[in-house]
Image (tube, helix red, strand yellow):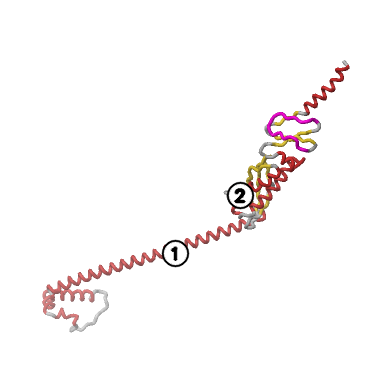
């Protein structure tokens, strides 16, 4: 009985020592076994691990992909238009030993804080080399890739692997919005004025061409009319000449009657003529006399 009482505490201590020497690493974790603050073992695969009780302790780190949102960051692009950038990054602990040496007892919180500084500096450096239009455009994947690649090299010293960096939102500072809107409005108005001027110039060219075409058409029509009129007059004169040659007396009669008709129309001005005027030659002729007597 006395021997059993003595062995019971020993068994309890042995059981506690055995329990405290075992630790479990699941698939979401990595573990370091430390002895007096120094790394003596790395456990990256999930499963059971062992350590020396009391002398050694285990520190666990997240092995999943982590996200980090940056506070809004003000940057100055190459055209000196200040912008407020909101970004986030995805990263993971790639080298757990380097991670422990870099952050010490601070753990993941201290690493995230240092990563923030790296991302902010890298974002400022990259966006400071391009114009604000490049940053505000929808096609800015190349910029995010540059930020990620620059951050990878610096984050490696922390044992971190930067997987991705994204610009969630890019805005103008509130105090610059009105000035920017006014400048954009002025630019659009200038572009509209240029378009109107070019439209007026094109309209003037079309109008001038149309006027020229009208003048050419009218001139050509007038020329054709004059040619036709001349040909008609020539044909008429040829008919008159033929008629005159066939019956000179009738032609003289016709011409005289036409002259009388045009000059003695009712309502015309009065004419005072001598009876011996050449105007009445046909009436005084034998033919005219016979015509009068016949009436």
Which stretch appears magenta? 38-53
Residue at the extreme front: 40
Identify the image quadrant of residue 190: bottom right
Q: In this view, does 161 lie to the left or right of 200?
A: right
Q: Main secondary structure of the magenta part?
A: strand
**Residue drawn where x is 43% and y is 64% of the image:** 205
Q: Residue 22 carries which label?
A: none
Give the spatial CA distance, label 2 vs label 1. 47 Å
Q: Is 13 drawn above or below residue 269 in the view shown?
A: above
Which residue has dot 2 on it? 143
Residue at screen point 84% across, 23% down: 10
User: Which of disc 1 and disc 2 is earlier in sequence?
Assistant: 2
Q: Residue furthest right?
A: 2
Q: Position of residue 139 (x, y in %)?
A: 57, 49
Question: Front-most of 111 and 32?
Answer: 32
Q: Is mark 2 on a helix, strand or loop?
A: helix
Residue found at x 17% / y 72%: 240
């Amino acid at each position: 009985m006395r021997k059993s009482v003595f062995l019971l505490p020993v068994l309890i201590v042995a059981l506690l020592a055995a329990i405290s020497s075992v630790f479990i690493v699941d698939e979401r974790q990595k573990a370091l076994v430390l002895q007096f603050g120094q790394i003596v073992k790395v456990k990256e695969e999930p499963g059971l691990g062992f350590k020396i009780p009391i002398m050694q302790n285990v520190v666990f780190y997240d092995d999943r992909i982590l996200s980090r949102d940056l506070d809004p960051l003000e940057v100055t692009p190459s055209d000196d238009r200040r912008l407020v950038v909101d970004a986030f990054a995805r990263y993971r602990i790639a080298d757990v030993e380097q991670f422990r040496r870099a952050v010490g007892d601070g753990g993941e919180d201290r690493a995230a804080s240092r990563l923030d500084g790296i991302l902010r500096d890298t974002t400022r450096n990259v966006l400071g080399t391009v114009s604000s239009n490049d940053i505000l455009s929808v096609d800015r994947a190349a910029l995010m890739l540059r930020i990620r690649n620059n951050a990878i090299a610096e984050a490696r010293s922390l044992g971190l692997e930067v997987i991705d960096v994204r610009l969630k939102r890019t805005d103008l500072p509130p105090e610059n919005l009105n000035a920017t809107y006014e400048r954009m409005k002025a630019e659009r108005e200038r572009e509209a004025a240029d378009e109107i001027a070019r439209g007026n110039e094109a309209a003037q060219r079309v109008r001038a061409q149309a006027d020229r075409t009208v003048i050419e058409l009218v001139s050509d029509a007038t020329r054709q009319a004059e040619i036709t009129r001349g040909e008609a007059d020539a044909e008429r004169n040829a008919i008159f000449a033929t008629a005159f040659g066939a019956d000179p007396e009738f032609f003289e009669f016709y011409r005289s009657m036409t002259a009388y008709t045009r000059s003695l129309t009712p309502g015309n001005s009065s004419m005072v003529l001598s009876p011996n005027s050449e105007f009445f030659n046909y009436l005084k002729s034998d033919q005219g006399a016979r015509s009068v007597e016949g009436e």
